[in-house]
Image (cartoon, helix red, strand yellow):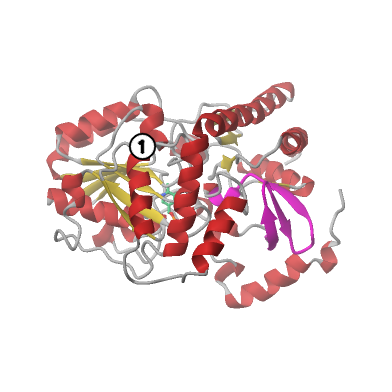
Amino acid sequence: MVEPNVSESKNKTLFERAKKVLPGGVNSPVRAFEPYPFFVECAVGSKMYDADSKAYVDYCMAYGALLLGHAYPEIQEAVKNQLAKGSLYGAPTEREVEFAELIQSASPCMEMVRLVNSGTEATMHAIRAARGYTNRKKIVKFEGCFHGSHDNVLVKAGSGAATFGTPNSLGVPEETTKNTIVLPYNDVAALETTFKACGNEIAAVIVEPVMANVGLILPVGDYLSILRKVTESYGTVLIFDEIITGFRLALGGAQEYFDVTPDMATLGKVLGGGFPLAAFGGKKEIMQQISPLGKVYQAGTFSGNPVSATAGYTILKLLSQKKSHIYPQLEKNTSELAKTLIDQTQALDLPAQVYNIASMYQIFFTKEQVTDYACAKHSDAVMFDAYFRELLRQGVFIPPSQFETCFVSAAHAPEDLKFTADALIKALWAASEKRKNP
Ligand SMILES: Cc1ncc(COP(=O)(O)O)c(C=O)c1O
């Protein structure tokens, strides 16, 4: 492995320039880490290459957006063809219709769908639609779930908000969040108590069916079915935020994987095939409240833009055709990486919990099982940092925070996985050393 000369690092120079024009030198806080992040020159398949020409096997995959890896040839080709025909029309296209039809056929709850540009927009509008439909104000979210960076949901939020100590952001007025009730995830008693107290006032419950923004936390037992039953009996709209799990746990996302159908869902990341695109949708009777049919207003200049819609259409077509091969292979590769972590933490006698599902995995350095945000916060951040840094040194990139999840893509070849397994073993050893000599 060739170590870049840090004193001459182009990454470092770029960061110095970036800090002068971008807050923290980045355009999204999760990208920042000490002493400076690497700047990407290009990416293809399983790998990214930085400004110092160092290669990384990538398990961040744009925070889960790239299920097929970087620069997937068929998506690139389709996008190039579309670009030649124009990049934005401000008028409907056939592509949007056939894309929406594909989303509808893949996602169990999607009777109707609206395309937007980001996950943040999708959850914001889904909540507005649920409030408009029920004519109620309150919503329930779960501690550590991240639903984007809009005011209603920036309460005890995960991801960068948790990493940088701003789970309740400045600039969000109390008046906006007073209708947001925050509950611990996987806690049936807390859910039932809240619904007994004010269930008839709750417009929506929004949940990441698998929590992937505070590390990886799985639903325990039939928690998602219980959520379904409770919300149904109070006429509350259940929204699955499938921005991460959609098209990742299965073609039909968590809804298919767990066989629980919410009233609404939000989709993004994988859906856009590497381009900015997201969607919200669900039951016809709710979606028919959206303008111009109904009185819930939602609009966007770039919504359904033909380039993103083409990338999204192409990836959904590919996934529909190859799902019987892609999903089992991803699950197998991911569980093998998880097994490496489990075996090595046992060999080193480290306090650790390893979770994996489909193509997602994460480690927490803690003795106790992690079932909610409070447990996740008990894990040893210093050990995680040592683990992250050793992986980075060896050319394996994972999200820099404990409060994120690692993503395996279809582009990860056997040699990448072998290289990664060796790197994981060394990184756990580094974490173990850090534990002994903090
Ligand atoms: C579950 C979930 N919902 C919503 C969002 C927001 O999506 P975006 O970053 O596209 O606005 C994210 C982003 O990470 C997410 O993980």
User: Considering depth in this image, is 148 or 270 the residue closer to the camera?
Assistant: 270
Depicted 296 relative to depicted 249: above or below: below
Where is residue 35 shown, x and y percent of the image? 70, 60
Q: Is residue 32 left or right of residue 130?
A: right
For residue 27, above or below residue 210? below
Q: Write down the residue under mark 1.
A: 184
* Viewer can see residue 193: yes
For the residue with label 1, is its CB less than 8 Å from the closest atom of ligand 1? no
* Foreground residue among 189 and 417: 417
Q: How many marks?
A: 1
From which residue to which does the magenta span run?
A: 37-63
In this rendering, the answer to whether 137 lies above or below 306 is above
Q: Does residue 219 lie above or below 314 as drawn?
A: above
Give the x, y percent position of residue 119: 40, 54
On whether residue 143 falls in the magenta region, the answer is: no
Q: Amino acid at mark 1?
A: Pro
Q: Residue at x 35, y 70 (%)?
A: 301
In this orientation, which residue lies closer to the viewer: 149 or 46? 46
Q: Left or right of 317: which side holds 352?
A: right
Local SS, label 1: loop
Quick one: quadrant of the C terminus?
top right
Task: Examine the image and state in which quarter residue 122 appears.
Answer: bottom left
In the rendering, at what x and y percent does residue 75 appear? 55, 53
Give how far across and how far down residue 152 sits, in percent: 30, 56
Residue positioned 55% across, 42% down in the render: 405
Q: Please tell me which residue is depicted at 77% across the width and 48% down the height of the picture.
A: 393
Examine the rendering and report whether any part of residue 357 can be seen. Answer: no
48 in the magenta segment: yes
Q: Residue at x 29, y 48 (%)?
A: 281
Q: Residues within 10 Å of mark 1 (few under 14, many from 20)?
A: some
